[in-house]
Image (cartoon, helix red, strand yellow):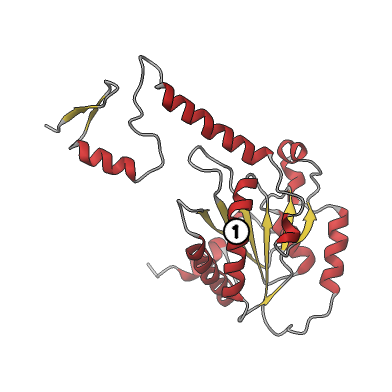
Amino acid sequence: MPEIFEMSSGSKFESASAAEFDAMKRATPARLGVGRAGPRYTTAAMLALRADHARAVDAVLTEVPRDWARRNGLLEVHSEARTRDEYLRYPERGRRLDRESIAQLKRLASAPSKRASKCSVLICVGDGLSSAAVEKNAAPLLKSLNRALASRYRLLKPLFIRNARVRIEDHLGEILHPDVVCMIVGERPGLATAESLSAYVIYRPTLESAEPDRTVISNIHRGGIPIAEAARKLAALIDDAIRFAATGASLAAKTSPPA
């Protein structure tokens, strides 16, 4: 019979050993063995839960500072969602650029290029559903990725898109026609962290692109995939996207070993 051990709260768990349970608890940010007071969480566990929930709500509702893009060398453009409330209530408005941004990017696209022989890559940052993730991790990831790619590709002017959904990269592709778009975006926060980024990579996106056309690397933060490792993974993914002229399901099919 496996050993039965009792937590300090009085609840019982069936396990091979208390040591194995402790090891599992250390390996995950999930709430394990928090105990209870009668039918309820302990006061400490409940207060920690409410604090984490408040951080998650703040990350969704708080806007990235107005000078963030300028301070980090990005051109700021906007989706059709003019306010944070509109962005959350009408997701489709976060998938298209507003008129002023379209005109701005068309002027950028018409500027002559001295390095047209190289494949082009657009790296952009969207606030998504976590301003905290963008403020904490987007700038260092962008810098690391720029260093990894600059010698091989023509990097377009990096952009920050305010009130952005992932599919706005399709609209960017329609206007700027890069070979690859890599969109770094704040993930929907959970109770473990509000500072996690995802990066969506797509080959030659258009308004006809669909979700299976994208490849995503997620969980980019201090407790997940570290910035340096994420930059290496993304650089390798962009190399593959250029080499195989594909991302998403198509890239997976081309790079999977034969059955």
Q: Quadrant of the C terminus?
A: bottom left
Please tell me which residue is depicted at 38% across the width and 15% down the height of the picture. Answer: 39
Q: Indicate the position of residue 95 as horizontal and vertical percent values.
A: 73, 50
Crowding around mark 1 (Cα neighbors within 10 Å: few <14, some 14 to 19, many 20+) is: many
Q: Is residue 89 above or below residue 176?
A: above
For residue 82, what is the image quadrant? top right
Relative image position of residue 27 (x, y in whole percent): 34, 46
Q: Is residue 76 above or below residue 118?
A: above
Q: Position of residue 201 (x, y in %)?
A: 60, 62
Which residue does the numbered mark 1 point to in the structure image? 200
Q: Nearer the viewer, residue 205 or 142?
A: 142
- Which is nearer the eye, 45 or 216? 45
Tell me if 219 is positioned left or right of 163 in this view.
Answer: left
Q: Identify the residue at horizontal 76%, vertical 54% (top origin).
A: 67
Q: In this orientation, which residue lies closer to the viewer: 102 or 159?
A: 159
Q: Residue lying farthest top?
A: 38
Q: Looking at the picture, which amino acid does disc 1 mark?
A: Tyr
Q: Residue at x 35, y 34 (%)?
A: 32
Q: Residue furthest left?
A: 1
Name above or below for residue 186 compared with residue 125: above
